[in-house]
């Protein structure tokens, strides 16, 4: 994936994250896979290739103060967190 295309994908994922959170209760969380599935246009497991870009998108939104990324209920940096993370609106 070319760098420009990667950036477009991350921006698309950022929009998907914010839209998904907007449709949920203020305290609700989503998984990066929710955004990956929302952006992926196929009907197979190809969305899995978008997991790392979805985590990058969550990290950019967290850096901008728009979301908080957590793991086991604690705020984490998605770039360094290993394992499943959740995304919620910033409080």
Image: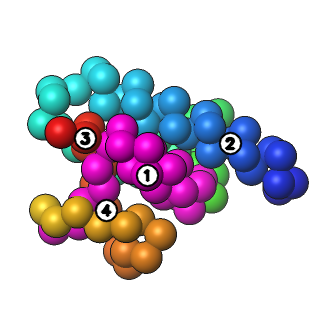
| Residues shaded magenta | 50-72
Q: Quadrant of the N terminus?
A: bottom right
Local crowd size for mark 3, using a 10 Å CA cut-off: few (<14), some (14–19), many (≥20): some
Mark 4 vs 2: CB contact within 8 A = no
Relative side of 54 to 81, left or right: right
Mark 4 vs 3: CB contact within 8 A = no
Relative side of 10 to 16, left or right: right
> Whole-Å distance between the Cαs marked 4 and 2?
20 Å
- Residue 57 position (above or below residue 17): below
Which disc is residue 85 wearing?
Answer: 4
Which disc is residue 63 wearing?
Answer: 1
Residue under the point 40% across and 31% down: 18
- The residue under label 3 is 90
- The residue under label 2 is 9
Q: Residue furthest right?
A: 2
Choose the circle earlier in sequence order: 3 or 1.
Answer: 1
Total label count? 4
> Whole-Å distance between the Cαs marked 3 and 2?
22 Å
In terms of secondary structure, what is the magenta stretch mainly?
A: helix
> Whole-Å distance between the Cαs marked 3 and 1?
11 Å
> Whole-Å distance between the Cαs marked 4 and 1?
16 Å
């Amino acid at each position: 994936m070319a760098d420009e295309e990667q950036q477009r994908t991350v921006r698309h994922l950022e929009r998907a994250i914010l839209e998904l959170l907007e449709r949920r209760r203020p305290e609700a969380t989503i998984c990066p896979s929710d955004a990956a599935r929302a952006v992926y246009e196929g009907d197979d497991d190809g969305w899995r290739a978008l997991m790392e870009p979805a985590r990058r998108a969550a990290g950019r939104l967290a850096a901008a103060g728009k979301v908080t990324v957590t793991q086991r209920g604690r705020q984490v940096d998605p770039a360094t967190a290993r394992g499943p993370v959740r995304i919620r609106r910033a409080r």
